[in-house]
């Protein structure tokens, strides 16, 4: 008998001939709620992200990266990039090349107001997961129409088959005396550029 | 009871970390004698209770979410065979390979062989309760493979040649200056000027592990959730070590208890709200990674999922006890438990400490192998109130106390009491005799065995000067 059949047999034995019939109550908040961008900013800042509300995306990125060098995913709109900042496009860069960059710019798939979370889904304007992981600075450009109020709305918008990364603030740990301390293995600096129309 | 193949089985002895070296009362006494440990625990649990309480108060539908989470887990258990088959089908369709491990030995063998097949000598690990439970690190080391723990607290434990003492924060028993000392002593290449400032300690771990992340080709992880109808796995973490392990290597091996499956994609909306607020007291943890099989050009190109029983089916067979399998490993019950706050996690002997450990460990091993754990509680019920999926831990504790072996003398004493209470004259004489109990001395230390065992942690009540019957007669 394979271990698969053994385990499934044990489970059926444990449950008996009439397993319980269970209804799941769904009376928690699920529906769409109004999006409060001010609250999103407050929640992002509370977990130590830096937020820029601008209409001039290249200008904001220029201000953040200074004289540094960027990596960007292949589908990032080039209009977002300041003309005088050097960048490499990820067309299969090595981990060392990505890690050597001073920062990465990506778009996002969804953002959640209530929790101050952005979600990346590896679309061409966000790139492979490694891209937003190794550089110490992650700049994420967000459109207001990508923002939802709550976690259930975000889950409903996402495509489960894609690699997803939910990000709430820069890398942190609670492992020393259970206080949140920013800055372990992921990017220690997270900047959100919230692109508002002028 | 006759046994046949397919009968739910307990976790085997001699492997893994579900059984302690000594019973809880003895281990607790050692822990209680360490004032530094008690200070560290009190500080940490007080901090987390405050944080968690504040973010839970922000959510107006917390109770509705708890009810949904509880029902989702009950639904999962009732439909476990179909959900696991569906998960296997979806993971396989997405390019993953699913393995089934009946117990710790089989899981260790599967993972060791998978690592051997890659030819690598080292694996990076994301913090995982399942791999601690089965003693995977010891099995890998025995096979000449070096496991590197990458979670900060796990690293502190591993470098300190220590044991984890908390589900979420395995080094909760260490304060910042102890962590600094461990790093200075054990971390190769550490800056000797390292201070005990937490951001500096975190920075030291970052520098130490960076090269290992970039050069290791195999990672081992656990999983917080596995979605049956999509085949998606989820790991919830803070530091980014999880993202490193789940993204950089060529091969990813995930070891997951069979109870971690979640029926469908939208169900994540419940657990992703419950878990961070109940565990680290955050609205959302810094990073959650989700992956479905293999994605060409992104992340590990070889993915193995090991589904682990190791006693879980035995837990499932108990209609009262099976809700212990609903646990999402948030550790809220540890942080509110007056017993855990004083003894810490090591006293429980198992990788699952605190209230949930006191109900889970004895059921995974069989009560006889952890017979003292159901008594490691005052039954105050704080754990039940704190549990985000409403596991009724006090009821399971009482249920397990009834299953634990009781001394034969206890039965004899109860029979004698019943006999006496059935006979009014005998009862009256017994009442008078009680007045002489003062002769036994303070706390009844003069009681003969086995009654002196009972009196070791209890005070004998003072007998009243006059019984009700005497008072009634003399009215």
Image (spheres, rainbow, N blue to C red):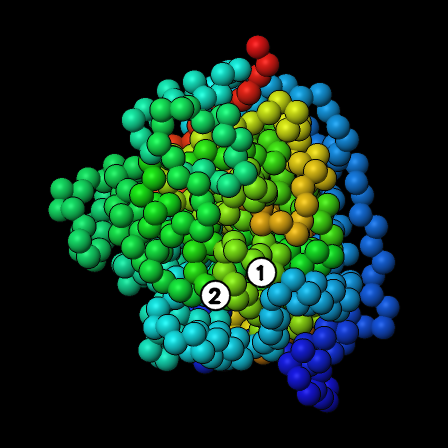
Residue shown at the point (75%, 28%) measured from the top left:
A32
Numbered disc 2: what chain?
B
For the point 13% across and 46% down, the residue is B192
- Mark 1 vs 2: CB contact within 8 A: no
Q: Say whether residue B42 is visible.
A: no
Q: Which residue is mark 2?
A: B251
Which is nearer the eye, B139 or B452? Answer: B139
Asked if residue B235 lies left or right of residue B325, the reply is left
Q: Position of residue A179 (x, y in %)?
A: 39, 36
Mark count: 2
Front residue of B401 and B309? B309
Give the percent coordinates (x, y) of residue A197. 59, 14
Q: Secondary structure at mark 2?
A: strand
- Element type at marker 1? loop
The vertical placement of A106 against B370, above or below, is: above
B463 or B336: nearer the viewer? B336
| B419 lies above or below A162 | below
Which quadrant of the figure contains the C terminus of chain B? top right
Q: Quadrant of the N terminus of chain B?
A: bottom right
Identify the residue at horizontal 86%, vertical 68% (top origin).
A18
Which quarter of the picture shows residue B9? Answer: bottom right
Dot 1 alpha-carbon crowd within 10 angstroms: few under 14, some 14 to 19, many 20 or more: many
B284 w.r.t. B136: above or below: above
Instruction: State the residue position of label 1.
Output: B294
Label 1 chain ID: B
Mark 1 and mark 2 lie on one chain; the one further toward the N terminus is 2
């Amino acid at each position: 008998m394979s271990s698969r059949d053994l385990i499934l047999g044990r489970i059926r034995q444990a449950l008996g001939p009439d397993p319980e019939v269970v209804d799941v109550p769904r009376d928690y908040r699920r529906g769409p709620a109004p999006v409060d961008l001010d609250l999103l900013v407050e929640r992002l800042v509370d977990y130590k992200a830096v937020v820029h509300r601008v209409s001039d995306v290249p200008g904001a990125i220029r201000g953040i990266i200074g004289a540094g060098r960027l990596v960007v995913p292949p589908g990032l709109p080039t209009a977002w990039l300041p003309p005088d900042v050097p960048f490499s496009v990820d067309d299969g860069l090595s981990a060392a090349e990505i890690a050597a960059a001073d920062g990465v710019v990506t778009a996002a798939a969804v953002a959640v107001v209530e929790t101050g979370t952005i979600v990346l889904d590896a679309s061409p304007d966000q790139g492979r997961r490694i891209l937003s992981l190794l550089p110490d600075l992650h700049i994420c450009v967000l459109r207001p129409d990508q923002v939802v109020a709550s976690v259930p709305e975000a889950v409903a918008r996402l495509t489960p088959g894609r690699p997803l990364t939910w990000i709430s603030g820069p890398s942190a740990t609670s492992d020393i005396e259970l206080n949140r301390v920013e800055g372990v293995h992921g990017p220690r600096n997270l900047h959100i550029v919230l692109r508002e129309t002028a | 009871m006759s046994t046949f193949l397919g009968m739910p089985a307990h976790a085997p002895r001699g492997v893994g970390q579900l059984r302690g070296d000594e019973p809880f009362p003895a281990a607790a006494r050692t822990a209680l004698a360490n004032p530094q440990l008690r200070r560290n625990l009190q500080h940490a649990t007080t901090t987390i209770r405050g944080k968690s309480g504040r973010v839970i108060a922000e959510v107006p539908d917390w109770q509705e979410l708890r009810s949904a989470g509880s029902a989702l887990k009950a639904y999962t258990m009732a439909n476990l065979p179909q959900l696991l088959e569906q998960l296997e089908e979806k993971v396989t369709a997405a390019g993953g390979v699913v393995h089934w491990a009946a117990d710790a030995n089989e899981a260790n063998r599967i993972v060791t062989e998978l690592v051997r097949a890659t030819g690598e000598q080292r694996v990076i690990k994301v913090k995982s309760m399942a791999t601690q439970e089965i003693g995977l690190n010891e099995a890998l080391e025995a096979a000449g493979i070096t496991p590197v723990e990458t979670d900060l607290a796990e690293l502190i434990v591993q470098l300190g040649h220590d044991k984890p003492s908390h589900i979420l924060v395995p080094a909760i028993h260490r304060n910042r200056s102890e962590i600094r000392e461990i790093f200075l002593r054990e971390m190769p290449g550490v800056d000797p000027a390292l201070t005990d400032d937490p951001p500096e300690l975190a920075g030291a771990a970052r520098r130490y592990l960076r090269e290992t992340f970039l050069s290791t080709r195999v990672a081992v992880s656990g999983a917080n959730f596995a979605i049956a109808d999509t085949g998606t796995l989820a790991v919830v973490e803070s530091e980014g070590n999880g993202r490193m392990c789940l993204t950089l290597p060529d091969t990813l091996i995930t070891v997951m208890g069979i109870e971690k499956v979640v029926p469908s994609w939208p169900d994540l909306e419940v657990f992703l709200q419950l878990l961070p607020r109940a565990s680290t007291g955050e609205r959302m943890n810094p990073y959650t990674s989700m992956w479905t099989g293999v994605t060409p050009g992104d992340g590990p190109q070889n993915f193995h999922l090991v589904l682990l029983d190791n006693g879980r089916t035995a837990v499932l067979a108990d209609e009262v006890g099976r809700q212990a399998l609903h646990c999402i490993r948030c550790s809220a019950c540890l942080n509110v438990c007056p017993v855990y706050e004083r003894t810490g996690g090591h006293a429980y002997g198992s990788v699952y400490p605190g209230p949930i450990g006191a109900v889970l460990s004895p059921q995974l091993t069989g009560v006889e192998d952890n017979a003292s754990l159901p008594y490691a509680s005052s039954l105050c019920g704080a754990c039940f109130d704190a549990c985000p999926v409403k596991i009724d831990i006090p009821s399971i504790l009482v249920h397990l106390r009834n299953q634990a072996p009781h001394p034969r003398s206890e039965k004899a004493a109860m029979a004698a009491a019943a006999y006496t209470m059935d006979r009014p004259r005998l009862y009256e004489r017994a009442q008078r005799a009680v007045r002489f109990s003062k002769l036994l001395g303070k706390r009844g230390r003069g009681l003969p065995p086995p009654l002196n065992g009972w009196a070791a942690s209890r005070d004998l009540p003072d007998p009243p000067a006059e019984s009700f019957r005497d008072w009634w007669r003399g009215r």
